Image (spheres, rainbow, N blue to C red):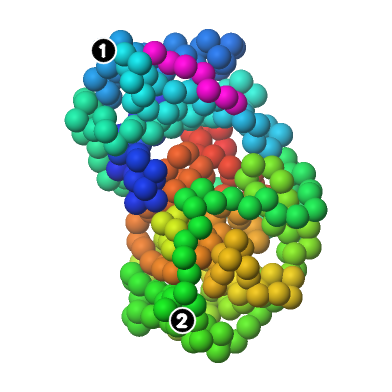
Amino acid sequence: MECTLKYPPASLRLKGIGKVLECLHVSARILNPLEDLQVLLKDLLPRYISLRDPRVEFSENEQIGDSYIIYKYHILDRNTFVASCRAVLRSRILLSVICTVDSSQEPRLTTRAVEPSTEPKLQRGPIPSNSPRGQRYIDDFVIYRILGSPVVDPDSWRFRVEGLVANPLTLSFEDVLSLSRAAVVRDFHCVTGWSVASVKWEGVRLRLIAEMAGVKEGARWVYMEGLDGYSSVVPLEDFLSDEALLVLAINGRPLTHEQGFPARIFIPHLYGWKGVKWVHRIEFRENYLDGFWEALGYHQRGNVFLEERFKVGSSLR
């Protein structure tokens, strides 16, 4: 098991998380998940946090798609909450363990946190049009507000394009509305296992925005931020795909506030958590940087048709 104590993105710090312990390349068979994982966590955590009388309490498990289960635990020390842990299993094989350390516990860390530097090795493959594995279709969207709903003033909203670009952009809502529009009809896929079929997405091709900014050689990732503090990251090649949009309307109607007005990201072949709502900033980067869910163990890219739900060891890809 390879574990790294990392600094979380700003979006997780908003939730009171001070550090993230990420353990990948596990590949361990778990026969009795509730018992075995408690033993594993009780042994693992004291290596990174100074614990006097640790207790591991099972919280809940969550089925993700057809194949994955997340087991969630609370870590207490002398009845004081210190961390939450998520263990991802697939067919009783432990893929990863992610623990978030409460910011109040930072002085008790026994290992110094580092900035993440390892570049993920992404499997390449086609983007088929058939229904992806592990998804179930429902009639309408489930709305998530993981960091709440921001106050949005379209008159003062600005869309900034920064990083490895020749021409940094700051676009007003009127500027964005004046750009050439495109529309696609594609399904929406949530990583938790639900999908909505045949949604019409209208907006500006992300490729056009990249061309306007003049992306420099060396850019490999695009980091995206919303007004609520949420963030995500995608490989440049996915950001530049033909149907990737800065969305302004859904099913013929302008975005509502809960849908991410004034603009959101949509990349059809990636899971929905990559589609940042209320997006206001994108940064073209050379190096990978976790966003909100990526820091909690979700995949660096999230290709629906390769079922890239979670970060896993290379031997299990």
Residue 84: quarter of image: top left
In percent of width and height, residue 145 lies at 54, 51
- Residue 155 image label: 2
> Magenta segment range?
55-61
Q: Residues within 10 Å of mark 2 (few under 14, many from 20)?
A: few
Farthest bottom residue in view:
178
| In this rendering, position of residue 58 left or right of residue 113 | right
Which amino acid does the dot numbered 2 rest on?
A: Asp
Badge 1 marks a residue whose secondary structure is loop
186 w.r.t. 194: above or below: below
Query: Comparing marks 2 and 1, which lies closer to the viewer?
Result: 2
In percent of width and height, residue 282 lies at 42, 67
Residue under label 1 = 52
In percent of width and height, residue 2 lies at 37, 29
Q: Is residue 238 visible?
A: no
| In this rendering, position of residue 110 left or right of residue 5 | left
